[in-house]
Image (cartoon, rainbow, N blue to C red):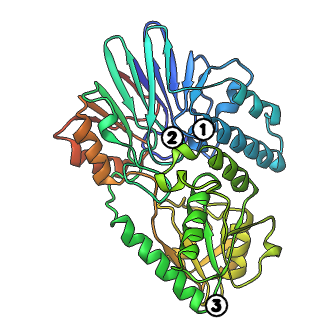
Amino acid sequence: MEIKILGGAREVGGSCLSVETDSCKIALDYGIKLEGEPKKLPTDFDAVVISHAHLDHTGSLLSLSKHNPTIVGSEITRDVTVDLLHDMVKIQNEKGKFDYEDHHAERIGQCWWARDAIALSGMKINLQPAGHVAGAKVTTLEAEGKKIVYTGDICTHDTEILKGCKLETLPKRPDVLITESTYGGKVRRPRQQLLDEFMEDLLKTMDNKGNVLIPTFAFHRSQEMAKRLDTAIANGYLPRYNVYTISNLAHKINDYYNHNKQLFTKEIRKQKTPFNYKHVKHLYRTAQIEEPAIVICTSGFGHAGASLRLLKDWANNEHNAVILTSGYLPPDSPLKTAKEEGYFKIEEETFNVKALVKQIELSGHADQNELVEIVNKLKPTRTILIHGDLEQAELLSERIGEMTDVCIPQQNETIDI
């Protein structure tokens, strides 16, 4: 059996692994790196198993649409993936010539097997909840007397809307564990402390009648944030305020969440339509905002859309705030420069920042302690670290090196099992 790292080695983005036996070849994820030239991935797979819907795990699927692929993943992952691919087609075609149209995105949905177990020639595949986002799965492969566990993106702590991955349900003593290492070197403060700090910063800005910009991703982070604020206002923890979401894609994904209540916490399951908010209103355009306001909007990294427009409009006012809840910001993100340098540039124009710009990491990824716990509980013979910068992977390797044989592969490296 051979594992080949086709994407996501020593970096975050473009996740794709090939697992090949004498009788079968499958891909684990089929992602894209959102910056730089798209990579050409092989197409000769018997099946492609998708851990979750984020484009860094699904964005290359369009290149399979002209073939007849077998794609395996959860039902909500299928629905959200198709919508995210439609969104990508729209954005790329607006930028210039793109090889794909909407019907290619639809084709991916038609080729999807929404199930938690599948048997291929000489291989069994099982999917179990991974935390992280709705529908995310940990994949177990069994073939040629070997067992491989692939975490995809994983989260073992509970959030307000989603339970973390239950490690006791995962297979023990696999021959190989392939795990993300996004935050392999980082230990976070307890989540409740971070949530308290987040709410305090909101209250301070609201007391000053300021505006709050919360850039998020359309899938899962938008729903989690909107539900958090809706619940806080309903419970009297936050005062009434103009609270808005601006993302048509996030608004559509709310419907999938309402129809898949069984994926969420007990509290969410009790509610009839938990993602129809009482105190958070969906808008189509920034011109509809009545200030002062809290706005949850895309893009999550501030490169475009409502988040970039509002960053430009609101950054120069000391009563306003920009709260970043993602732990990772790419080097070219205007949010990153706003936070670190006190200004940001868009094309040739420089914008000074007087607003509070703060990062409070309410992440859906496991931190170093959680990743160490995964290795400790599963007791793999070998552990392959991917989906993390080299520094993060090395810091994690130092913590787990006495428990398991660790490998931090390079791009296109092949590992014999």
Residue 136 disc label: 2
Q: Is residue 247 above or below residue 107?
A: below
Quarter of the figure with the C terminus: top left
Quarter of the figure with the N terminus: top left
The residue tagged 3 is 209
Residue 365 disc label: none
> Which residue sits at x=76%, y=32%?
106
The residue tagged 1 is 77
Q: Earlier in the sequence, mark 2 or mark 1?
A: 1
User: 229 or 187, which lies in front?
Assistant: 229
Q: Earlier in the sequence, mark 1 or mark 3?
A: 1
Q: Name the residue type under label 3.
A: Lys
From the top left corner, tell me how far across and down residue 149 is, in percent: 37, 29
> Which residue sits at x=83%, y=49%?
94
| Mark 1, other Cα within 10 Å: few <14 / some 14–19 / many ≥20 | many
Q: Can residue 101 be seen by looking at this rendering? A: no
